[in-house]
Amino acid sequence: MSIRRRNLHDNNKREIVIENGILKIRDLDGNTVFPTMIAHPNPDSDVAATFFALDLYKIKYGEVEFKSNSENGLVEEKTAEEWLRDGYILVDVGGNGEPEKVGGRLIHLDHSHDLSNKDTCATTICLDLIKRDMEAKPDELLIKLVNFVRRNDLRGGRGFLDFADICKVALAKLEDHEKLLYMKALLNAYINNKGEPNSELFCEIFAEFAEGKKNIPQKLLDYLKMVQEGKTQNIPDLVRVTNPEAASLVRLILEETYLSQMEYREAEMLCRRIKEVILVGGISLVSLETDNPQFHRAALSNGADIIAVKRSNGHVQIYTRKSKKGINLEDIVVAIRAEEACANGDQLPNLADLRRDGAFGVWYYFKAGGMLMNGSSTANAQRKTKLGFKKKVAPTIVAVQNGYMPYCKGRYPCSKECDLYLLNFANCRRYRATAENKGSRKGETLILAR
């Protein structure tokens, strides 16, 4: 059947298929189009591995466009079905939180967004499609790569100079299409090397890179020592993609990593200059307006438990120490999203929406990573929050951690007349479980006006 561009029947449902080695959108009558692919800006390891898998099996796909949340084309304001109808396939971007399959039809290459199927990412969904339509049997090395990408994408965290770290840090400043090209080249080198380290060549490249440089960051020196001792990881870290063809790319990664470590040193200096650290029940909170991408990591290393950061473009991110007990992150998420709704003049959303893991409004909750994000490097065109950083965001975090709820007027015991009664905050539940509550707790009640 010939490939037609945006020539599907409007009344038919669509699905993503691979036919004759070509990724297509097909309607129920069998008509197909050659789609455009949409991925988020600053592509990460999940995006790279998805397109690499298609390349590996020589599957043709359309042009890749990088779209984020923006006033002129909010990706998540259209469903994946609507994007399919217009001839686009979503890769690792929203689509209104739909599961990847509807009635057996594959409608996007993103996370499942289905609570019963949390262990999927763009790469695993793409590989399942390849296995189904190409009858392919991935080898052990590819499966290892896919499992690594899935763990990293769903749980966060990365090892120094492993593939996820390279994508996130070392190549972050490249243009999106160039970055995707480089990342696929790295994965190709890894697969072709069969995952075997090339320590001798890496040490030669490192010596060339370090020549004339002063104060090489300790992390780079530690990594070099691991290479020399043969203790690198089993996942695609830098030394496992080192070959003569990839040597120039390895040099670029080392240079960019060096600059990133310099940023980290600057971030540590910023931490030392912070004059106010708020302590609430053994939990420390720091907040700062900075564009340094390493600040939250430096703050965590220096003992902070909750870090609120405002960027010069107005975006705000909240990071937490995942291992720390006593951080009421879910309540913070509910409170911040409730504040945002009020700032927009909207009705208070229901509790399920406010607690939703993933995107809701301008805030993205990454539960596994312990983060609440308004915009990020992969959503750099997201609308900025309407909440004031110093007068709303930080005080709301303190209020939740301090046992006081936003808008709480100190009416105890809790009453159904309270606007937040149905939001069922953890502290509200404790108040209601107490037979008698006389007055407010010690300290100043934070009253956040609507």
Image (tube, grey):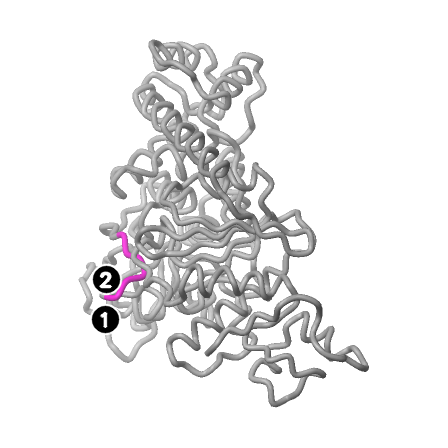
x, y percent for residue 186: 37, 30
* One can see residue 254 in this view: yes
Judged by its main secondary structure, the magenta piece is loop
At label 2, the amino acid type is: Val
- For image coordinates 31% across by 33% down, the residue present is 182
Q: Secondary structure at mark 1?
A: loop
- For image coordinates 23% across by 62% down, the residue present is 33
Can you identify the residue that label 1 sits on?
A: 8
Which is more toward the observer, 215 or 274? Answer: 274
Is there a contact, CB below 8 Å, between mark 2 and mark 1? yes
Which is more toward the observer, 106 or 164? Answer: 164
At label 1, the amino acid type is: Leu
- For image coordinates 64% across by 79% down, the residue present is 410
Which is more toward the observer, 431 or 29? Answer: 431
Would you place residue 245 above or below residue 433 in this image? above
* Magenta stretch bounds: 66-71
Question: Could you give the CA–CA distance between mark 2 and mark 1, rounded to whole angstroms?
Answer: 7 Å
Task: Determine crowd level at label 2: few under 14, some 14-19, many 20+ residues with C-alpha closer than 10 A.
Answer: many
x, y percent for residue 34: 23, 57
Would you place residue 41 above or below residue 256 in this image? below
Say left or right for 151 vs 76.
right
Which is more toward the observer, 345 or 57? Answer: 345
Indicate which disc, 2 or 1, sits on the residue closer to the N terminus: 1
**Residue 50 covered by magenta stretch:** no
Can you identify the residue that label 2 sits on?
A: 33
**Residue 68 covered by magenta stretch:** yes
- For image coordinates 33% across by 52% down, the residue present is 40
Say left or right for 406 vs 264.
right
x, y percent for residue 360: 44, 68
